[in-house]
Image (cartoon, rainbow, N blue to C red):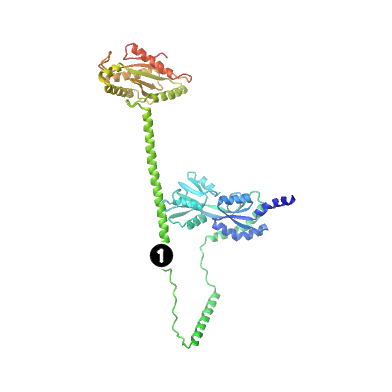
Amino acid sequence: MRRWWWILAWAPLASATEVWVKQQDPLGRALAQQFLPTLSQALDQPLTLRLADDDRDLRHQVLSRQGIGWGHVTSANAALYEVQTAVVSRQDFSLDGPQGRMGYAAAAPWMAELKLRYPNVTWVPYRTPNTGVLGVVTAEVDGFVGTLPNISASISQLQLNSLTLNPLPYPAQMGLFVAPDHPSTETLTASLATLKPQVQQSAHAYFKPLQPQAAQPWAWWVAGGAGALWLMTLFAWLMSRGRTFDPSPLPTVQVQPPGPATDEREQRSQAYLNQVNQQLQNEVAQRLAKEAELLKVQQALNQAQNRLEQQVRTDALTKLANRRHFDEQLNKEWRRHCREQVPMSLVLMDIDYFKKYNDTLGHPAGDECLRQVAGILADSFNRSGDLVARYGGEEFIVLLSHCPVAEATAQVERMQKRMQAAALSHPASEISDQVTLSMGIASCVPILDDDPWGLVEEADQGLYQAKIQGRNQYRVAAA
């Protein structure tokens, strides 16, 4: 039993000997390999370099295996060096800084500062820099931000051109980080002060182009001696074959620059890249065209839906609101007036002797009469809160919001004057040679527990009283 406890206690220490670095971080890999012996000596134990798939996998391995991470660090860890960040975009959509839709590596901790500095940017996370750069090429995003080594490696690996790379003024902090309960935290912290100048110098040198080194003086002596020995050997070989040595200069061998074959390969490669870029641009253009076409279809569908809703709520003959729309609006206005405790009124009206009108002049003439009366009512009750509806047959109803009974009667009287001015002929009427209306008016301050249809019944009672008392008039129902 003690053996098993000893194995369990030793297991985390074995994982603590692993140094994890992201596979797509060329600078981090180079520095980790260079300073791995120094770290091993500082920790007094051999260290093994391991590769993680991406930033997310890197942090997962460090936390779960108690290892040491080499990559992006936060303020809680000590950084060894800084790496320039950059934004990459298409040449036809060049960006100096983050704007629009920007992609980024999802696990990069330095992105928190950029998100705070650019709150109006729409940030789109990507798992790897390669997928982010491809997102720029395919116009999924306007640009991608990341560290300069990662973006440069992605562009080179994907063999892309027509991209623009601009630096950002926010360097990423890079170096060592460990889990909070790592057994070697104190030792690593103490060794960072010693490592930092050397790592910074190596990181800075990583970006310097390789310069040709001057030949050492002794190299010229070796080269000269070898040349003299070769000439002596050649002279002895010619003499042994009985030939005289011709002191004329030997033919020189000129090194030619890359020939047509090399140029042809480069031209084919460039032509292929241009073809790929052209295909991507064509796909982007087709996608934008499809999106524009879908937008037009969506707009047409919205317009058709609006027309359909309008048709469902409109009377086909008079173009007024129909009974269904009136019922919906009455319930809505009743609740609103209950909350505001203000009066509302209804006017229910009927064309006098309309059946005789149809029997005398015919139904087409009757339909035209309904349309003309509807137009007069719509012109008379035209406040923003008024609703004129065809209630059924030759009956019309008007809903007057925020309207007491006195104002309702005044509007009805103005409408009667319009009817008289229109002088719509009615040869079969028993009370006038013109079309007339009988009307009932009802008004109240709604109460939530009451039924709004009670107000309609009161207006109907007023209409009944107007007909009994001779028609062509209005009566106000008792409140």
Judged from the image, the secondary structure of the residue bearing numbered disc 1 is helix
Tell me, yes or no, if residue 397 can be seen here.
yes
Name the spot of residue 478 as percent of width and height, x first: 41, 13
Q: Residue at x 34, y 11 (%)?
A: 468
Q: Residue 197, image x and y in percent?
A: 60, 58
Left or right: 276 in relation to 1: left
Q: Residues within 10 Å of mark 1 (few under 14, many from 20)?
A: few
Residue in the foreground of this view, choosing between 299 and 250: 299
Left or right, 469 with reference to 427: right
The kind of residue tagged 1 is Glu
Mark 1 — residue? Answer: 264
User: In the rendered image, which quarter is residue 41 located in?
Assistant: bottom right
Q: Residue furthest top?
A: 469
Locate the C terminus by quadrant. top left
Residue 26's place in the image compared with 431, above or below, is below
Residue located 43% across and 17% down the image? 454
Give how far across and how far down residue 73 sits, in percent. 58, 51
Q: Residue drawn 42% across and 63% down?
A: 266
| Residue 476 visible in the shown view | no
